[in-house]
Image (cartoon, helix red, strand yellow):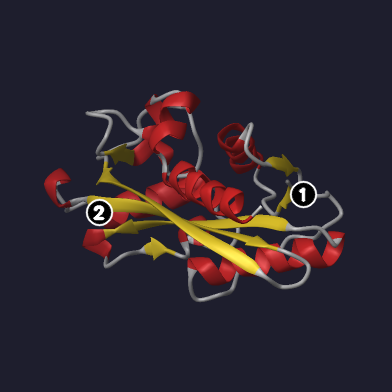
Amino acid sequence: MKLISATANPHKYKEMKQIMAGKVEILPRPSEIPEVIEDAPDLLGNACLKAQAVVKATGMPAIADDTGLEVEALNGEPGVLSARYAGPDAQSEDNIQKLLGELSNVTVDKRGAQFRTVIVVLWPDKTYVTAEGIVSGKIALSPRGNLGFGYDSIFLPSEVAGRTFGEISDSEKNKISHRSRALTEISRVLLSIS
């Protein structure tokens, strides 16, 4: 089975290819497809918007995801706005600094958080399947590690004692991450219907 990735993020595409290797072939999003405005109220809606744009442009089935970092002390924020938390043109560093600023008076034991990824596979006939992956953890007091991307340098996953996603290898991260869990589940669903 071949799916076109809807992500324009090279880091996400690399993770998808690594995790889905041997199960489903993930092709890169054609560069001529314009950036999709992600204005849905939730992760599933944004994933669907991206998948629809790719299916419309290519006529092939697409796989799309949206991921949010949900922080307990901030009532689930930044959530669906994670990529744009510090503004529409924010870089990862801007988002991290805003989040750490919001948590400046919150102790580590109260910094519970989770990454949540929603995946959609959409076919040209409008049929689709979805899956979700969650990894729980905490927000660190300051960035640590230069691996990964996005909020990885401040997210301490529960399964890896004392290290952020930014401090662990791709192979370690791909065993426990939210995206890995969602992709593993969507693979299971796809293999059951193929």
Looking at the image, do the residues carrying marks 2 and 1 touch, with CB atoms under 8 Å apart? no
Instruction: Quickly name the residue at label 2.
Output: 103
Compute the Cα span from label 2 to label 1: 36 Å
In the image, 108 versus 18, the foreground residue is: 18
What residue is at 43 percent from the left and 44 percent from the top? 151
- Mark 1, secondary structure of its residue: loop
Eyeballing the image, is 88 above or below 139? below
Q: Amino acid at mark 2?
A: Leu
Eyeballing the image, is 120 above or below 155? below
Q: Position of residue 32 (x, y in %)?
A: 87, 54
Q: How many marks?
A: 2
For marks 2 and 1 on the same chain, the one whose residue lies earlier in the sequence = 1
Q: Position of residue 2 (x, y in %)?
A: 75, 46
Q: Position of residue 10 (x, y in %)?
A: 66, 40
- Mark 2, secondary structure of its residue: loop
Q: Which mark is residue 151?
A: none
Of labels 2 and 1, the one closer to you = 1
Q: Is residue 131 left or right of residue 1?
A: left
Q: Which mark is residue 29?
A: 1
In the image, 191 versus 57, the foreground residue is: 191
Eyeballing the image, is 44 above or below 147? below
Q: Amino acid at mark 1?
A: Arg
In the image, 93 versus 46, the foreground residue is: 46
What residue is at 77 percent from the left and 72 percent from the top? 125
Q: Position of residue 165 (x, y in %)?
A: 39, 33
In the image, 109 versus 24, the foreground residue is: 24
What residue is at 59 percent from the left and 73 percent from the top? 39
Q: Residues within 10 Å of mark 1 (few under 14, many from 20)?
A: many
What residue is at 41 percent from the left and 26 percent from the top? 172
Q: Is residue 79 left or right of residue 17?
A: left
Eyeballing the image, is 45 above or below 101? below
